[in-house]
Amino acid sequence: MFLTIAHRGDPLAHRENTMPAFRSAAAKGANTLEFDLRLTRDGRIALLHDARLDRLWGVPAAIADLTLDEVRAAGADDQQVPTLDELLVAFPETTFLVDLKTDDVIEPAVRELRRHGDAFDRAIFVAARQGGREALVRLRTAEPDALIGLDWTEPVPPSEDLLDAMRPQYFGPRWRVADACGVPAMRERGYRVWVGPLAAEADLAAAYAYGVDGIVSDDIDALLRLAAPVAAGE
């Protein structure tokens, strides 16, 4: 399956990391939803990329300093910061790309995913942040059956020591370093490779032609137009 990965849902049509954005991406045909996890002050798992609510919600506060009720007060109805539980209930069969924004959210997220049937088996964990690689190595030790993706921004291949410690099944470099970090060699070694996030149609087409197993995109419409021949078996 070619991974059509909706970056924070469908952020060009709806506010990112909200239920309308995720529903829109899934309705259009995205087979993988990417989202970000953080903990509120009262230990609830919320979907939010930024550490603070300023940019999207106009609230000058950090999510870690607020309870879930206080966070959700920033929006109304389904235009709120959703919880992981809400998303898992709404999408019982979808593949997830789960960006673990802080160390303290990892164990609660694993518990919540395991509580929802096979959701853990449909989740690919990444940690695109400083210290994220160490966190994923610890996750591999604690959860040997976890699906892990190694996010990558460097113009060199990952070291063998890192690959041996993390044992990722997926490799997720930025498009600009695809050649330098050895994407063809990584695919030959059995890693499934995605690139992104991309939005420009020219970049999407170039990445697709280059040969990858998935693309992360903000423009889910353009990505799905590109991937339609694969979905149709052409």
Image (cartoon, rainbow, N blue to C red):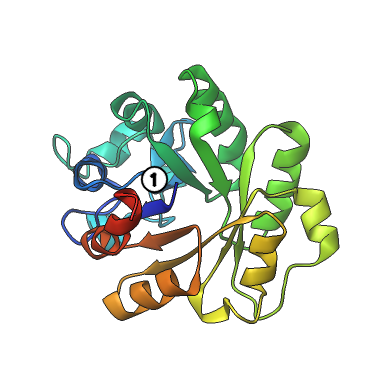
Q: Position of residue 33 (x, y in %)?
A: 37, 45
Q: Residue shown at 50%/22% (left/top)?
A: 118
Image-based side of 40 in relation to 202, left or right:
right
Q: Residue shown at 65%/55% (left/top)?
A: 191
Observer-nearest of 220 and 103: 220
Q: Quadrant of residue 133?
A: bottom right
Q: Specify the farthest residue to the right.
A: 161
Q: In which quadrant is the C terminus drawn?
A: bottom left
Q: Is residue 7 visible?
A: no
Q: Position of residue 218 (x, y in %)?
A: 30, 63
Q: Position of residue 64 (x, y in %)?
A: 46, 45
Image-based side of 91 in relation to 193, left or right:
left
Observer-nearest of 7 and 47: 7
Please name the residue that numbered disc 1 is placed on. 32
Observer-nearest of 45 and 60: 45
80 w.r.t. 223: above or below: above
Q: Residue shown at 69%/69% (left/top)?
A: 185
Observer-nearest of 183 and 176: 183
Q: Residue shown at 49%/45% (left/top)?
A: 98
